Amino acid sequence: MTFVRTLIALTLAAQLSACGIMTTTPKPPPPPTAQAQEIVRAQTAKLVKIGTVTAVVRGSPMDVEAEIQRKATAAGARYYVI
């Protein structure tokens, strides 16, 4: 019976500690530039979403990132999140 209680306690502790991983500390975004900049989720706290962009590009992941940045800049966005 002690083994089962220990296992339950460890499982509960693991689940509760995993919840802390999903929380982020808000950070301010960098100053705006001429082109849209990629930011992380923690920097989006006070920003307003203006849309969604998709890109299908043959090549490397960096090519897709460049295409998303180009589309975000064309849409007038200052920042974007991938």
Image (spheres, grey):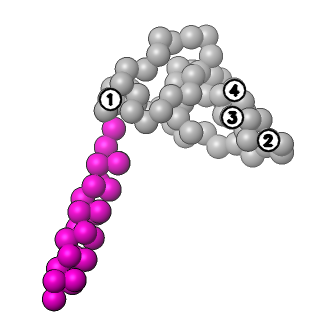
- Which one is nearer the viewer's eye here, 76 or 56? 56
Q: Secondary structure at mark 3?
A: helix
Amino acid of disc 4:
Arg
Q: Residue at x 37, y 20 (%)?
A: 28
Q: Residue at x 56, y 27 (%)?
A: 38
Q: Is residue 75 visible?
A: no
Numbered marks: total: 4
Label 1 vs label 4, nearer the camera:
1
Is tag 2's residue or tag 3's residue first in the polypeptide sequence? 2
Q: Which residue is mark 2?
A: 60
State how far apart marks 2 and 3 are (Cα).
9 Å
The amino acid type found where label 2 is placed reads Ser
> Element type at marker 1?
loop
| Viewer-proximal residue among 50 and 57 | 57
**Span shown in magenta:** 1-24
Q: How many angstroms separate mark 1 from mark 4 (CA)?
A: 26 Å
Q: Report, in whole angstroms, how far the alpha carbon at label 4 lies from the one at label 2.
A: 16 Å
The amino acid marked with disc number 1 is Pro
Is 10 placed left or right of 30 in the picture? left
List x then y, in percent, for residue 22. 35, 48
The residue tagged 4 is 70
Which of the labelled discs sits on residue 65, or is there none?
Answer: 3
Earlier in the chain: of badge 2 and badge 1, it is 1
